[in-house]
Image (spheres, rainbow, N blue to C red):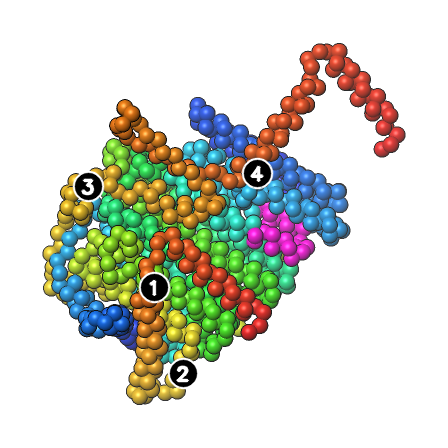
Amino acid sequence: MKPVIIIVQALILILISLLISGIIRKIKDNLKMRKGASIFQPYYNFLKLLSKDEIISENSSWIFKITPFIVLAAAITATCLIPLFGTGFSLNNMGDIFTLIFILALGRFFLSLAGLDTASTFSGMGSSREMFISSLVEPVALLALFVVALNSGSTNLSLIAGVFNFKLSSLVAVIALFMVTISETSRIPIDNHETHLELTMVHEAMLLEYSGRSLAMLELATHIKQMVFFSLIAIILSPLIILPSFSLYQILFTIAFFLLKILIIGAFIALVEISIAKMRLFRVVDFLGFAFVLSLTALIIQTWGM
Amino acid sequence: MLGVVTANNGFFFLIMWELMSLISYFLVVFDSKKSKSIQAGTIYIIMTHIGTTFITAAILMLFNYSNSFDFIALQNAAELIPSGTKNLIFLFLLVGFGTKAGIVPLHIWLPYAHPQAPSHISSIMSGVMIKTAIYGLLRFVFIILGINALWWGVLVIILAAISCIVGVVYALIEHDIKKLLAYHSVENIGIILLGIGASMIFLKMNIPSLAILALIAGLYHLINHAIFKSLLFLCAGSIYKATGSLDIEKLGGLIKKMPYTTACFLIGAMAISALPPLNGFVSEWLTLQALFLGALNSSGFLRVFLGIAAASLALTGGLAAACFVKAFGITFLSLSRSKKAEEAVEVPFSMKFSMVFLSILAVLFGLLASPIVKYLSHLSQYIANIHLNTSFALNNFTLIIQSKNPIYLSTPLILLLFLLIITIAYFIIHKTLRSNKVATNKTWDCGYYNLTPRCEYTATGFSKPFRLAFSFFLLPQTKTEKVKDSFYHTTSFKHEVSTIPLFNKYIYDPILDLIMKTAKITRKLQSGSINVYIAYIFATILLLIIFMGKF
């Protein structure tokens, strides 16, 4: 039973991830008084890319070809760690919350290498910036999760999901984690999904040479990674409802509740995105420095009561 | 080296230690035609002797209480030593062994000496020799001296965290591949010492299971570092043999010419960047867990302190990954940046064999984490003199850390899941879907269609964000010169970027100045006239006669 549930919930997370991106985009467009594309646009894009032909740079090597697979595998492996249906139902035998960070780092490592592989200046620039930002993100993410784990008494994700964590220290840590999410999902103050301008070239620049099915895989991985971070925040903020039985009604209710949480987080991201301008690359240091101070504050609050 | 670790007597230990240092001096100056080698050797021998002096002093202080150099006698005598002297001995040992291990700020010899030796020697020096210092620290502090105070562990962790970050930041801006690896040794010694320092704290706090866990983490990383650092140095040797250059700005495109070296370097780079499921990941994960559980079981400042230590480890991991994306990407990927790199050919079988062997080890030490941790657990229990009932291995594939809520880690499962997802994705993409056309064409270069290696991103460019973000520490300087052929016409620009080595400038140079100045003053005593010298001898004898009764 358990493996089936884990596969099902991973599939649900993967399927929903595209929808969430579509909804965030729709909210943003509506707030800008635009009509916007349908919320199912990411699905159409994905299917369109799958049917396209592919061009590979003649300068590139096998690293360029295997990267989409590895990035996608990293994102999906990370989803398997996240419980959706209740506390016991994730692959917690495989690893914990720290493992999740390291697994995502593996995907990023290969994506940055692929950026350097094509000999294009733009994607090299993207790789450099991505590694720069992510290396600063890593301590923030780890410290924030460290505080949350201290509150739950373990780094085991199932246990974190099961403990009611609504404490001040967790809340402060979640704000830091939210800032991490913004930069990891390449959202506006740090990066911009929607353009290929030189100024915003971080994540998109690395994908510049990809096309067709490889690009489809990489974009899917981006959506899934965003879902992973949203789910982490959702899990920390409000615990899962533990299923007494596996009736259809119960399962649907759990999914609906989970979706609601994710939607609220997504809407919040959309609000942040339209109200802030993109930062200069070296302002990112200040942004993440602030996030680090926040997670440190969370640790201090956690240590001395509250 | 073997002599050092097999000595059972403080006296022989010192002799072997000195022998090891002296022999490795000759290995550093192996290529003695280069003035750089001589300079590196000189720095090395001076630093290593400063270290040896401190170790000798510490052992003599111990001898004062035991009257025997035997390790067991020293261990028995350790109880008699008053606390203040113990602290002093510990500090001396830390400075002494720290010099050999290359902890900041005693690391300055390491990036000079290791790259100067031939590659296989550097792989032994960086991979194994600096570990003897960790052995010495474990032998003298854990087994003989015993942990006396909490601040010992705290001090070790602070030094370790600083070493980690300083090492990796210097590695990031370094473009000579062997120097880069040498700086990474400083970083990795820091990670090892994080585990060992945490273990010292937990021993003092009397939480034996955590002390063992932290010690396992440190020892595991020690072995892992020996594997992947030797591997990377051997790869650097292969690159040097094939291209005659170690400057990564002049390399590039080697992936098509040297497939074996590339694959091995990639595995080494992934291992050192702590990416799952390789060995570096397991030991860093264990270190993080030790720090986390330590924080969970402590309170107040110590908890915040351990949290910050964990964050600094995470920063190190992120920066190390960035550094190896740079090192691997610029060296092996895209177009060749020089003619030599273009004409490179794969190295002969003998060199390939040792690299492939070490890569397999790096993978195995990642996947077989459970049996290895089981073995290290016995070892750590011997070192810390604790007997523990709990086991850290659930079965042969899964690690378990037992606390109130058990935490698991299974690297084979991660690999399995990865392979499964990749296979499924591959079948969906290439078998079930309608086949599509995959064409090979030029990289997009804004329609210019003349992409040359000069258009590629360089290592200097890659590390620029880091250079600027850490500018308070690296103190980068730029110099721009115009080359003119007349007053109005500039033919070309010369642009230079350099950084100031902080530790050399603000710690070592003043000391060196002071020594030179004192030397100048004392030189006045040496007039060259034999009469004056006889007068000195006479005065000395007189003084000795006067003070004879006093002692």
Chain at tag 3: B
Same chain for labels 2 and 1? Say yes or no: yes
- Nearer to me, B461 or A105: B461
Q: Estimate the spatial distance between the alpha carbons at disc 4 and disc 2, rounded to whole Å.
A: 60 Å
User: How far apart, in angstroms, are the residues tagged by discs 2 and 1?
Assistant: 38 Å
- Indicate the amino acid at tag 4: Ile
Membership of B146 in magenta stretch = yes
Q: Which residue is mark 2?
A: A242
Q: Which residue is label 3 attached to?
A: B451
Q: Measure the C-alpha gap from mark 2 to mark 3.
A: 58 Å
Q: Quadrant of the N terminus of chain A?
A: bottom left
Disc 2 element: loop
The correct choice, above or below, for B511 with respect to B409 in the image is above
**Residue A236 image-quadrant placement:** bottom left
Q: Which residues are magenta?
A: B135-158
- Type of residue at label 3? Leu
What subunit carries mark 4? B
Mark 1 element type: loop
Q: Which residue is mark 1?
A: A276
